[in-house]
Image: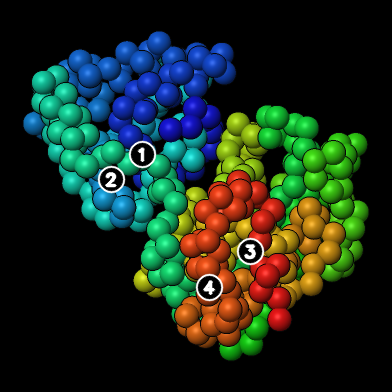
Amino acid sequence: MSTTMTSNKKLLVGYYQLNDLRFDWPEALGKSRLEGAPLLREILSLDALVHPDHPLRKSGSKGVELYVGSLKSGVKQLLISSAQADYLRYWLHAMTLTEEMIPLPSSNSLVAATELSFIQTIFCETNQQLVESLHAISRKGNAAKWAKVSAQPTPRERGDIFETVRNLWSSSTGVWCAIDLEGWEEDRSGKIITEFGFSFVHWNKGKEVSDMGHLIVKEHKMYKNGKYVADNRMNYKFGASKVLKRSAFRARIQQLISGLRKHGPLFLIFHDCKQDIKYLTDPEMNPRILAPIDGHSMLQPGATPQKGVYIVDTADLFRALEGFGRQAKSLENVCRALKISSQCLHNAGNDAHYTMLATMAMVSGGQIDTQRQQRWPLAHVKASSKASTSKAKLAEEDNDDDYDGYDDYEE
């Protein structure tokens, strides 16, 4: 669970791990030098939770109400609802134990109900019952780490997700928006965002609607890249960049996402999504959330969503299409393999549009096996040959992030 917090007034509906909430929420308050950490730690202790006078104990109930939830991966945990967490901070304030309402835990730690394959209510009346519930759940196959976004998908799951994305795209479902954010390379905290780029497609009465753009943070123009990644901030190739003050930059992103969500399910496309999602949603990086993507989740195989926000990662899509890739490829190498001419990467606007083009190239084609054979008819034969004749070389390639596997497969 992230130790960051948010003070957003609109609480997202979902669940937190009980154990993580007990330990990490108070710790986050303490690190931020905010009041309430000792009180929160005490009120979330196991002894306190089962006390008849606990604020979460409903009158006439058989104990404190908790939840057992299971991710679609099968991992289970004992949960507390977001409504209960919100009520605790309200109760502490109403009882004048805190001067201000303490912040909520980070929305990154929130598990939306849609991400659970099932949710069951349980009641614990004694400390022993609560401890036994925690232990029983942890023994039932929970070796995998609980996470909001589950572990890396298997090759089969990637293939199923690829076909799901292809089917949704071919049916003109929802809005597809590729996003990229760039930050200052020497900022270890990850808080200094310098650029935002987007490129979207949706359909209106059967007609395709598209747009793209590139925004630059005015106050951060002095932070230059170039040491580790190329400095292409001023080299947007698909129109004019807009230089905006931080407040206008944030408002423009929120306006964009809110507007797109009105057209049905929103599929946000990233190339290697983790850092960009943190930029958009982590209040420790940005005290005011950049994007209203509450309840977002990774797109699941076979999904037919009617609303909501779903994450699509082109790095995973390409690994599925490629079939024999051992590591995620860079956006540059993905474009090269798909024969998309790219230039001035590490400009957020360019990267977003090339990510959109790469997605369209993959999901506009035939089924995955057919595409694979059409694109690289000799690739799998040669890859297999390399695997059997040179394990040492493969090990070296596995450790080379720039190895793209296609130098030998050019026609």
* Helix, strand or loop at mark 2: loop
Look at label 1 and name its amino acid: Lys
x and y percent of residue 305 in the render?
41, 69
Spatial CA distance of label 3 from label 4 is 10 Å
Q: Does residue 4 appear left or right of residue 124 in this picture? A: right
Whichever of labels 3 and 4 marks the residue nearer the N terminus, that label is 4
Camera-near label (2 vs 4) is: 4
> Picture quarter containing residue 68?
top left
Whichever of labels 2 and 1 marks the residue nearer the N terminus, that label is 2
Camera-near label (1 vs 3) is: 3
The label number, if any, that marks residue 380 in the structure image: 4
Look at label 4 and name its amino acid: His
Residue sitting nearer the eye, 396 or 23: 396
Q: State whether residue 303 is above or below residue 397.
A: below
Whichever of labels 1 and 4 marks the residue nearer the N terminus, that label is 1
Q: Residue at x 57, y 18 (%)?
A: 32
- In the picture of the structure, the residue carrying the numbered disc 2 is 75
- In the picture of the structure, the residue carrying the numbered disc 1 is 145
x and y percent of residue 315 in the render?
58, 60
Q: Is there CB contact under 8 Å for labels 2 and 1?
A: yes
Q: State whether residue 393 is above or below residue 381.
A: above
- In the picture of the structure, the residue carrying the numbered disc 3 is 405
Spatial CA distance of label 1 from label 3 is 31 Å
Q: Residue at x 40, y 10 (%)?
A: 38
